[in-house]
Each structure stands twice: as structure tokens, then as C-alpha cells.
Amino acid sequence: MVIFRCCGSDQFFLERVVFPFEILAFACPPLSEVKIWTHGLYGPELLETFVSEALLADQPAPFTGTAGGMFPSASTTLETAPWLKAS
């Protein structure tokens, strides 16, 4: 288990506990600072610090379906949205 902290411009702050094998998806302002903390023998211990751009992922094609864009439209295919494939 680690603690994920992200601080950015305009008083942006995000802190989450991330468990092993858990995936955390988030959005933040450009050039935000990310810190990964763990609990050491004597309290919180900083593991790593980096800029949020190091974690950039490809963004999926925008949804145009129903329910406020939560579902893919009928024209969305595996070629346009490969993330829909099961691994």
C-alpha cells in the first residue's frame, strides 16, 4: 500500500491510498508534482517524486453515446478504441 499525492497549480491537491495491483486514473493541471509515500518503520517515508507528465497515458476516443457520454456509441470499434478489448 502506498499514498499517492499530487499537488498542482490553482491549489490543486489529490491524495489517494493505492493498494497493490490497483490502477489509479486521475487528471491534474500540467506540471503537477507527484509524490509516492509509504509507511516505514518510523512513520511516513517518501519513495519517489516526479512531474505528472511522466505518467501520461493515451486518451481514449471521446464518447458520443448515451447517459451523458458514459457509454461508447454504436460507431465505436476496437480499432478506434482498443482499450475496449479484454486482455
Image: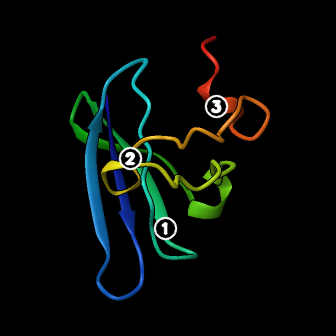
Q: Earlier in the sequence, mark 3 or mark 2?
A: 2
Element at label 3: helix
Task: Bin the neighbour count of mark 3 within 10 Å (Cα to Cα): few under 14, some 14-19, many 20 and up.
Answer: few
Q: Earlier in the sequence, mark 1 or mark 3?
A: 1
In this rendering, position of residue 18 left or right of residue 58: left
In this rendering, position of residue 80 left or right of residue 66: right
Residue placed furthest toward the front: 74
The residue mark sitting in front, 3 or 2, is 2
Mark 3 = which residue? 83
Residue at horizontal 39 percent and vertical 62 percent from the top: 6
Residue type at numbered disc 1: Glu
Residue placed furthest toward the left: 43
> Does 59 appear above or below 33?
above
**Residue 70 tag number:** 2
Q: In the rendered picture of this protein, how many numbered marks are placed on residues? A: 3
Mark 1 = which residue? 33
Residue at horizontal 46 percent and vertical 49 percent from the top: 65
**Residue 44 tag number:** none
Residue placed furthest toward the bottom: 10
Element at label 1: strand
Q: CA–CA distance between discs 1 and 3?
A: 27 Å
Q: Provide residue 53's location: percent of width, then percent of height.
A: 64, 62
The residue mark sitting in front, 1 or 2, is 2
Task: Bin the neighbour count of mark 1 within 10 Å (Cα to Cα): few under 14, some 14-19, many 20 and up.
Answer: some
In this rendering, position of residue 82 left or right of residue 16: right
Residue type at numbered disc 2: Met
Q: Earlier in the sequence, mark 1 or mark 2?
A: 1
In the picture, residue 69 is in which quadrant?
bottom left
